[in-house]
Amino acid sequence: MRYFIGGPGQKFCRREFETDTGTGPVTIAVTADAHSYVCAYCQKLRSDGNDGNWLMGGSFIKYHLFLDGKRLGVGPFRGIRNGNRVEHIFPAGSLASGKHVIACLMRMEQQGIAIEIRAGGQVIADSASAFRQCSANEFLSPVCWTRPEISSYFKGDIGPGELFEHLQGEFEPEGWMNAGFDDSSWEECTPKQWEGVPEKAEWNYRIEPESPERIVPLGNGSFLIDFGREAIAQIEMTAPEAAYVELRLGEELMNDKCVRFQLRADTCYQELWHFARAGQTLSHFGVREFRYAEVHGFPGELSRENFRRRVIHAPFRSDAVRFVSSNPELNRIWELCRYTVEATAMDLYTDCFTRERICYEADSYVNMLANFAVDSAAPAAKRSVKYMISHPTWPCEWMQMMIPVYYEYYMHTADAETIRENWKELVRKASYLHLLENGLVKRFPLEIIVDWPINLRDGCEIDADYVAIPHFLLYGNLRKLAFLAKEIGEEDCFTPAADAMLPVIRSAFWNPERRLFVDHRGSGHSSLHTNVWALWNRVVPPEDCENVVDFIVSKGMACGIYNAQYVLDVLFEYGRAEQALALLLDDGPCSWRNMLKAGATITTEAWNCSQKANMSWAHPWGASPANAIVRHLCGLMPTLPGWKQYRLEPLKINGLQFTLDYTLPNGEKIHYSTNETEGE
């Protein structure tokens, strides 16, 4: 039995409790409202009974939990199943005997929050009684009443799952998180019983304080702040005296004095904070994604002591994998992708936190492989794999990519239980097996997307019947499903279907004159994407592989960042490692080095801003070099599920020297260095 308090709205909530000597380690269990999502309109009018996960409504973070004035954590995660509540357990250590205060700042839409304080396996206090609350709506004001010009015309919204926070410090009760605070004027919480069983969060967000790398005074109380790299974070600021301080955040600079606070992703990070007293500290409730800050009206000198950020992300082992090479540019690209994974993994793999907080299937495939490349533990992988089944997205091939996601997840973890648990839904939603008629599908469901943005599809023709790319994915997926079926003891009805399908699609989409695949049956056009996906799914006859690979080499990186994953894959796998490395190290407009030149510290949504006007500067589907380096250049990947066996076949390319130290999930260390193998 759990007792929910708070209800809808923004609340300060607290209670005091006592512990005796020898109580033992204390944990605080918190269960909060489930996350909600925007209406079916934004789901492209889905008719398959799924709410999807397009643009979270409400608030991404619903509570900040404090014990004796110190922050214990934030939460909750999005539920694996739609509408599920998630329970987080926060360790509080051994508490001294005497009075303590559990406090919570919350933003809820439904019943609120349930809290249990546990010690020695027993509940010593909970939210069934003694909690008191007062409104935080005026403190966390979504409208800037003091300076109407900030809110009076539309500059962009705050982003999904967030509200503007024009903090009004006079409405924050001073000392409310500490023992002895007089809360007699607060109302007593009325608990509501809940007999449900919440999901259990296997881990909590890591919250890390960071100081600015650079603070530039601009005069008249204005400052430009650079944290050195982008992160999902919150600002915490302390003012030496009462003042109104305007805060602007952004991913990039307009010039050397101005932050682009109206982000390209149509998000606006501009807020006014009122410090009501000297020494008051104010901080965000929600999260923003930013590198730079601009402050106006600060009273006195802004310093690393009074201006910082709290970075929030999933647990990450920064020492789990080390790669260094003799090529400085390759090292920079590795670090760009490594940090991308560290900075962007939250409760799930998410495309970006500025515009769409969605766990897209295809994004997650690249994100997960990159995650396994830089930290094999990858705590977000399991949650994401489970979440996708009940929160599918809208593109045709993205739905199909759930099968490669499950396949790679199983190869890295040997987690057969998760595969079995979701097997029927995986086959039903993602296999498209039932659509086959004589080896072909006339019209696939949902929207065929090929690549993103649209202008990077190399002219691929998809407005037609019998489009090639989803056929190739369907065939490759049947092979993967056949493997998984045998692993978990399910019937293999996929191998016969794949065997029957292969000659049909080879015939339907093959141009014998050019010896290339065309975009759809009857088309005369052969795009890079169609032929990459044919190779990636093992559709190309062996005798024609060389010609198809030559065509891909001739095209270069004529695709978006998403399809770069598969271009690198096929070039490495089909004996063109030198050309793959050349693309990886290229410094042209469509390259990772160009991202770095532009100032990106996390991989971007498009190669450059000219390709996508509303580009996100933090899109982890661009981190494919991380897994290309480990899987292909270093030649390290599992050959049996769960790394029971693996291969280590490093490539020798153009005298490149490199060292890889990789920690397997079981703790085993793998070390390879070209310097140590020369002459062998």
Image (cartoon, rainbow, N blue to C red):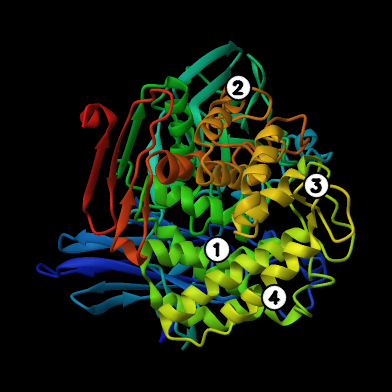
Kind of residue at badge 1: Pro
For disc 4, the marked residue is 432
Q: Is residue 609 left or right of residue 353?
A: right
Residue 299 placement, left or right of 132: right
Q: Quadrant of residue 318?
A: top left
User: How far separated are the C-alphas under marks 3 and 4?
Assistant: 24 Å
Of the numbered discs 2 and 3, the one sitting upstream in the chain is 3
Q: Is residue 269 above or below residue 314?
A: above
Nearer the observer, 426 or 220 = 426
Binning the other alpha carbons within 10 Å of mark 3 as few (below 14), some (14 to 19) or many (20 upward) gives many
Q: Nearer the viewer, mark 3 or mark 4?
A: 3
Q: Residue at x 29, y 57 (%)?
A: 665
Q: Amino acid at mark 2?
A: Asp
Left or right: 147 in relation to 10:
right
Dot 1 falls on a residue whose secondary structure is helix
Q: Residues within 10 Å of mark 4 (few under 14, many from 20)?
A: many
Quadrant for the C terminus, please.
Answer: top left
**Where does the image place residue 243, in percent across and percent down from the top left?**
57, 29
Residue in the picture at 77% in, 64% down: 507
Task: Estimate the spatial distance between the alpha carbons at disc 1 and disc 3, rounded to whole Å.
Answer: 25 Å
Question: Would you place residue 63 above or below residue 548 in this image?
Answer: below
Residue position marked by numbered label 1 in the rendering: 404
User: CA separation, marks 2 and 4?
Assistant: 40 Å
For marks 2 and 1 on the same chain, the one whose residue lies earlier in the sequence: 1
Q: Secondary structure at mark 4?
A: loop
Q: Which mark is residue 587?
A: 2
* Tag 3 residue: 526
Query: Which mark lies nearer to you, 2 or 3?
Result: 3
How far apart in space, not on screen, are marks 2 and 3 (Cα)?
Answer: 26 Å
First reached walking from the N terminus: tag 1 or tag 3: 1
Q: Is residue 21 visible?
A: yes
Instruction: Say which residue appears at 35% left-offset and 62% top-offset.
Output: 102
